[in-house]
Amino acid sequence: MSSKTDPAATEPLYGFMPRHVKGKQVRKALDHNLNPFTKKPHTTQYKTILETRKKLPVYGQMEEFLEIFNKNQIMVMVGETGSGKTTQIPQFVAFSDLPHTRGKMVACTQPRRVAAMSVAKRVADEMDVELGRQVGYSIRFEDMTEPGTTFLKYMTDGMLLREAMNDNTLARYSTIILDEAHERTLATDILMGLLKDLAKRRTDLKIIVMSATLDAVKFQKYFSIRSDSEAPLFKVPGRTHPVEVFYTQEPEKDYVEAAIRTVLMIHRAEEPGDILLFLTGEEEIEDACRKIKIEADDLTNQDPDSVGPLVCIPLYSSLPPQQQQRIFDPAPRPSKADGPAGRKVVVSTNIAETSLTIDGIVYVVDPGFSKQKVYNPRIRVESLLVSPISKASAQQRAGRAGRTRPGKCFRLYTENDFIKELEEQTYPEILRSNLANTVLELVNLGIKDLVHFDYVDAPAPETLMRALELLNFLAAMDDEGNLTALGKLMADFPLDPQLSKLLIASPDFNCSNEILTITAMLSVPNVWLRPNNQRREADAAKETFTVPESDHLTLLNVFNQYMLSEYYKQDRNWAWSNYVSARALAQAENVRQQLQRIMERLDIDLVTTNDEVKLFTNVRKALVCGFFMQVAHKEGEKGSYFTVKDNQLVGLHPSCGLKTQPEWVIFNEFVLTTRPYIRTVTEVRPEWLLENARLYFDLESFPDGETKRALKRVHAKKYGLVESRNGSRKGTPVDEPAPKRRKTQAITQPNSKK
């Protein structure tokens, strides 16, 4: 039959052979009037976006990319930020792989949730499809895909790792793209090891490793599956204009103040163009946005003829998607027809370094810091510390200013510090993390020889030993290093091992309903709002929710009150007037529902206790099951606490709601700020430690010191020898009276059993 009479010949994908597709075929399909994936005519918006796409550097190298992709199983790609690799390469792969015709998917992993969501939205627009159908995303606690329809999926690297636990061949994927590999997150590093091994078993699986920096040679060598050849390298230049870099003469004492000052100086004195300021976290960013806005409004009011309007937009991972999209809004218009141009300031964490590209940025302000995870295996403490960035990160940040036209980068540190103090590359996360979760995932995947696993950079043996020790104490692994039945259940939860153990053990204490809520609250950003100018009011509001002996119970209380206000629709401004974050609470509600579904699937009962005094005691007892390795003991009268076994001197964090300084507490996290603190704290009784964590609190092997002496006294008191009526001697447990507590409102979720 000739193509003239064959109706299929008019289809956009006519003549496409999977993995033999040429660039000119793809270009023709993109210019076609019909959408190849929905068979509907293209919208006018599609044509406009396509013209923008054609200007991206990577678009011009489509032929070269497809040639390398079609011929090789694994390839490494280096594309400077802004080259279009994250949005375009997965689409080129979809045209070559045609996954929708074979019931397969193309996965593109991102280290950050924000990037996975916003890139998926952009790509859905570019492909003229609905987000969540042909193109979707998957992040922890949120799946925006449609089984059977989605063929291009953006996801966090952690989500793909979890999928590998349920299907170690990742059979549903035809191609896996690891994006932002230069960030060297823990999950991406582990995925590289798994995929390298999987590539040998699944010759049909293609793998693309994408990086924004030139450490790609390391990835090429790592992925040389056959000894005679390295993985091929595909390079794409960025769209860059020259960037002038300025340094400070002296080191800055307060980088946030210096950053605000610099932004306002640019706004007053420099040509039109948007500003990108890098700061380290949500609180710092919101605070800076508020201050910049106040100062800028003052400037505009004083001199409306020379200073235009300014809008300040925050960007960090816990912002809801619609607010994240504001960074792409245009700058404000001049306040009057011939007035000075408006300016947009984006204040962001290092997510804007490589993950997202914001057009219109001409000025970058770089204080030289980011929050990084740091782990000390000797004292088992993992903290987020504000640390200096690497030279590679500093170069990435500066490059953001040269996207649209020549730009300027203001580094708030000296040139000497840049040359001598900053490391060349960001230190891989696997070398500075607590690996308990990773070890649980790897053992669940059937990888028992953790020391000889093919890491890109192997972690210290001590870190692996600490992880195995924790899992052994939690009873997730036996002494031979095998996963126990409990460990298998724990691996099903997308949580830290302590929290999953806590959830699984909670029905034994008749409070799984409450522990489920507390776990959800510990899995979302901070719920307490404390605006600078309303700190007293915020503290008074928090006081009304406080349960005096437990920050964990306080979190339960605030969630229950929130649910009551939602259920009875009492007050739309309830969260705002109580100084709590409605966004974080709504997130906690969503997380709770998802964890509840996992509990139901695993037949873990949802139960509660009617008597509130007993319930609160049960919750505190249950918390010991998960956090018995995070116990602090008060020594002396000055309120000094020492962490058990590791003997670190710590203080209760100022945000802690405990009214007294109890002798024994468990804590959720260790925070290093001006000094070491423990945060989210609950008072516990020492006999609970001896009952619920016997292996860990084995007094025979316990290190000598005040803590051991105190535990011995408790042991003697609880199992003290007393005379019975018939003259025999036996140990009798001695119970202490329950502490007095204040009345709080507790509600039970509608579907819990009593």
Image (cartoon, rainbow, N blue to C red):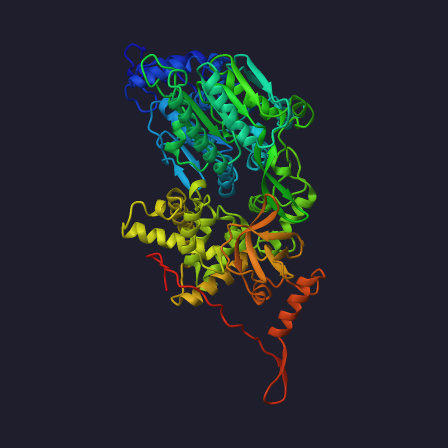
Could you tell me if residue 535 is visible in this image?
Answer: yes
Question: Residue 10, located in which quarter of the rendered image?
Answer: top left
User: Residue 30, image x and y in percent?
Assistant: 37, 15
Residue 100 in the image: above or below residue 527: above
Residue 247 in the image: above or below residue 673: above
Q: Is residue 734 left or right of residue 271?
A: right
All told, the count of numbered labels is 0
Task: State the residue lying farthest toward the right.
Answer: 704
* Image quarter (top left, top right, bottom left or bottom right) of the N terminus: top left
User: Residue 7, image x and y in percent?
Assistant: 28, 16
**Residue at 54% over, 59% down:** 625
Task: State the residue lying farthest toward the bottom.
Answer: 726
**Residue at 37% over, 64% down:** 754
Q: Is residue 175 left or right of residue 649?
A: left
User: Residue 94, image x and y in percent?
Assistant: 43, 23
- Nearest to the observer: residue 175 or residue 742: 742
Could you tell me if residue 179 is visible in this image?
Answer: no
Residue 447 in the image: above or below residue 237: below
User: Residue 209, image x and y in percent?
Assistant: 55, 26
Question: Residue 712, located in which quarter of the rendered image?
Answer: bottom right
